[in-house]
Image (cartoon, grey):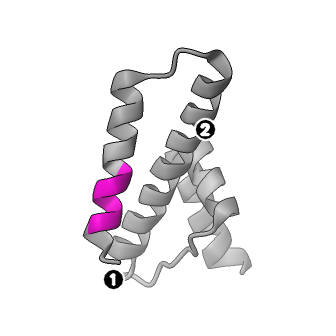
C-alpha cells in the first residue's frame, strides 16, 4: 500500500472518532487509546521521514508507538536519545 493511503485512512479514522465520539465509557477509553497509538505511529513516521537526513531512525513497532503516542513529543525525544546513545 502507498503511504499516503495509509496516512489518509488513519487521519480519517482519527477525525471520525474525534467528531463522533463514543457513547459508552469503555468504548470511548479504547477509542482514545487507539487514537493515541495512531498519533504515535504518525509521530514516528514523520520522525523517520525527516530524521533520515540526519541519520535518525526509530523502528515503528507496538512498543515505540505506545511510548510516542502516550508520552507525546517527550516520548519521541526519549526514543531518539535511546536509539542514538544506548542502542
- Quote the CA–CA distance across marks 1 and 2: 31 Å
Badge 2 crowding class, 10 Å Cα cut-off, few under 14, some 14 to 19, many 20 or more, is some
Q: Residue shown at 67%/69% (left/top)?
A: 82
Q: Residue shown at 57%/67% (left/top)?
A: 80
Label number found at residue 53: 1
Q: Residue shown at 32%/72% (left/top)?
A: 3
Badge 1 crowding class, 10 Å Cα cut-off, few under 14, some 14 to 19, many 20 or more, is few
- Disc 2 is placed on an element classified as helix
- Above or below 29: residue 8: below
For the C terminus, the image quarter is bottom right
Residue 9 magenta-drawn? yes
Residues in magenta? 5-10
For the N terminus, the image quarter is bottom left
Q: Could you tell me residue 68's position as x and y percent? A: 57, 52
46 relative to 33 in the view: left or right? left
Badge 2 is on which residue? 33
Residue 45 magenta-drawn? no
- Which quarter of the picture shows residue 65? bottom right
Amino acid at each position: 500500500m502507498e503511504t499516503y493511503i495509509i496516512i489518509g485512512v488513519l487521519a480519517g479514522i482519527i477525525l471520525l472518532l474525534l467528531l463522533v465520539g463514543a457513547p459508552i465509557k469503555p468504548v470511548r477509553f479504547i477509542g482514545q487509546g487507539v487514537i493515541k497509538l495512531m498519533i504515535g505511529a504518525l509521530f514516528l513516521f514523520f520522525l523517520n521521514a525527516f530524521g533520515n537526513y540526519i541519520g535518525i531512525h526509530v523502528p515503528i513497532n507496538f512498543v515505540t508507538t505506545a511510548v510516542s503516542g502516550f508520552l507525546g513529543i517527550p516520548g519521541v525525544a526519549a526514543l531518539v536519545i535511546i536509539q542514538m546513545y544506548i542502542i
